[in-house]
Amino acid sequence: MNGLMNGKRGLIMGVANNHSIAWGIAKSLAAQGAELAFTYQGEALGKRVKPLAAEVNSDFLLPCDVEDIASVDTVIETIKERWGRLDFIVHAIGFSDKSELKGLYADTSRENFSRTMVISCFSFTEIARRAAELMSDGGTMLTLTYGGSVRVMPNYNVMGVAKAALEASVRYLAADYGARGIRVNAISAGPIRTLAGAGISDARAMLSWQQKNSPLRRTVTIEDVGSSALYLLSDLSRGVTGEIHYVDSGYNITSMPALETLRV
Ligand code: NAD
């Protein structure tokens, strides 16, 4: 199918480089005709994002740090001025202090708990509320989560708690905005080697475990996530909202390691 996103304009938040999940999503949307705006966190990342945006024919780039709500407001105001409306947003933003993505969850500090929650969870709600004002003809919103929200993954710690709250936010926002024709969903991606992913202690072990023990016996790619995002952001999923859609090679359905890994 071609042109699934023709005439649709959307905001992509969370591209840091060409390994970012948000970049995998941006590529698949652009290939189907979407017009994209990008945010970047700070000028150093902006230098990386600019040429990527150009690859998908976008010159619409805006700085945004979600800890600074004024920068979020400026993004929304600038989109309103230039486009007048929005059809979709992608929120692929997460952060927690690396020093707490190892060891015991119980040792999480109050400061990092709050910061992780604001950046990785509450920012989606703050952005959704503002973006909804530009979605007068309906729209779609997508965020990224991880299975450490529902099951304990070593070292994921406070990020797992933030992702659980993010997933709950998806359901509440879907209920809030459903009557306005705005759908809100999340993709729960399996582990992928990215900047954020590398912040989690023993990330390599998690990747190798997933590869050996998921039903598809492989890790997922940013292109895998991009294809599923295309479904969730396009009219193909017009009857779907409040959903946490797993793109994890089926890992979430398993209850024990693959038998071949146990045989000696
Ligand atoms: P990434 O490092 O490429 O992207 C993370 C993005 O978050 C970066 O662009 C960074 O600039 C942005 N960010 C962090 N703090 C910010 C702030 N204060 N303001 C604005 N932006 C900020 O890594 P990624 O793996 O592509 O992460 C994207 C999303 O996918 C995250 O929510 C992450 O938790 C989630 N996710 C990642 C994996 C994985 O294994 N990589 C798996 C499941 C879900």
Image (cartoon, helix red, strand yellow):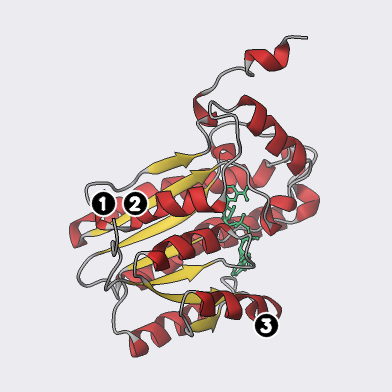
**Residue under label 1:** 236
Asked if the residue at label 2 sits under 8 Å from ligand 1, the reply is no
The quadrant of the rendered image in which ligand 1 is seen is bottom right
Which type of secondary structure does the marked residue at label 3 adopt? Answer: helix
Q: Position of residue 44 (x, y in %)?
A: 71, 79
- Residue shown at the point (44%, 67%) measured from the top left: 126
Q: Position of residue 219 (x, y in %)?
A: 61, 39
State how far apart marks 2 and 3 are (Cα).
32 Å
**Residue under label 3:** 43
Q: Is residue 220 in view? A: yes
- Residue shown at the point (63%, 79%) measured from the top left: 46
Among numbered discs 2 and 3, the one appearing first in the sequence: 3
Given this view, does label 2 or label 3 mark the residue nearer the observer? 2
Among numbered discs 1 and 2, the one appearing first in the sequence: 2
Front-most of 200 and 238? Answer: 238
Identity, as a three-letter code, of the amino acid under mark 3: Glu
Q: How many marks?
A: 3
- Residue shown at the point (51%, 64%) measured from the top left: 123
